[in-house]
Amino acid sequence: MNWEFDVAIKNRTLLKSFIENHTLKELNKVPDGFSNNIIWNIAHTIVTQQILVYRLSGLRMVLSDEMVTTFKKGTKTERNLSQAEVDTIKGLLFSPIEKTKEDYDNKIFQTYNQYTVSTKSTLSNVEDAISFNNFHEGIHLGYILALRKSL
């Protein structure tokens, strides 16, 4: 699983660069033809990782209920985020992945509630969830790249 964790960290490094290289206005802009903005996509990846890996394992997530409600699957950008909220999201890019690796290495994940994702693949264990999460984050990286071109 070290390879999967390495991929996750590298992707989060790319996401961090979008936060650092775009203004608050650019991060919040929802271009014509899109439902969400760059910062929503970044926050959504953080929330989804926690749901797929922790919630479906019956374990507590490290995120607030408000963050999960705001950025989970099926939501869209409802308002502009403040700089403080963007800073919070930036601060959550790496620690959940590092905690997941630590918890995985310590064999914390003992059960998993099977879940079929939108691509019709069924996640049966935490390894499936970690692997699928990298695919999911790649999709959102693609959206972010398209959003950036539309700014």
Image (cartoon, rainbow, N blue to C red):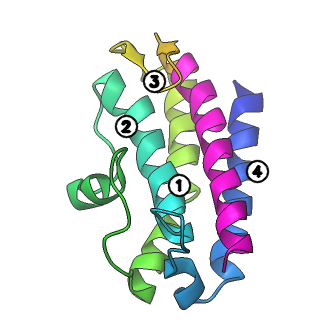
- Which mark is in front, 3 or 4? 3
- Answer with the quarter of the image where residue 132 lies: top right
Residue under label 2, please give it.
51
Residue 107 picture location, percent across and down: 49, 19
Q: Is residue 77 above or below residue 118?
A: below
* Type of amino acid under label 1: Ser
Residue lying at 58% horizontally and 46% vertically, measured from the top left: 98
Circles 3, 1 touching at the beta carbon (< 8 Å): no
Compared to 15, does 29 lie above or below?
below
Q: Are marks 1 and 2 in contact (CB under 8 Å)?
A: no
Give the magenta part as a residue range.
128-151
Amino acid type at circle 2 is Ile
Q: Which residue is mark 4?
A: 10
First reached walking from the N terminus: tag 3 or tag 2:
2
Tell me the distance, in whole angstroms, between the alpha carbons under discs 3 and 4: 23 Å
Image quarter of residue 15: bottom right
Which residue occupies 46% across, 60% down? 43
**The stretch drawn in magenta includes residue 26:** no
> Could you tell me which secondary element the residue under label 4 belongs to?
helix
Is residue 141 inside the magenta stretch?
A: yes
Q: Earlier in the sequence, mark 1 or mark 4?
A: 4
> Dot 1 lies on which element?
helix
Kindly report the distance in space between the C-alpha atoms of the residues bearing marks 2 and 4: 20 Å
Q: Earlier in the sequence, mark 2 or mark 4?
A: 4
Circle 4 Cα neighbour tier, 10 Å, few/some/many (<14 / 14–19 / ≥20):
few
Disc 1: CA contacts within 10 A as few (<14), some (14-19) or many (>=20): few
Vertical comparison of 74 with 107: above or below: below
Residue 18 placement (x, y as % from top left): 68, 72
Q: Which residue is mark 1?
A: 95
Q: Nearer the viewer, mark 1 or mark 4?
A: 4
Q: What whole-number distance in Å separates the C-alpha atoms at marks 3 and 1?
A: 24 Å
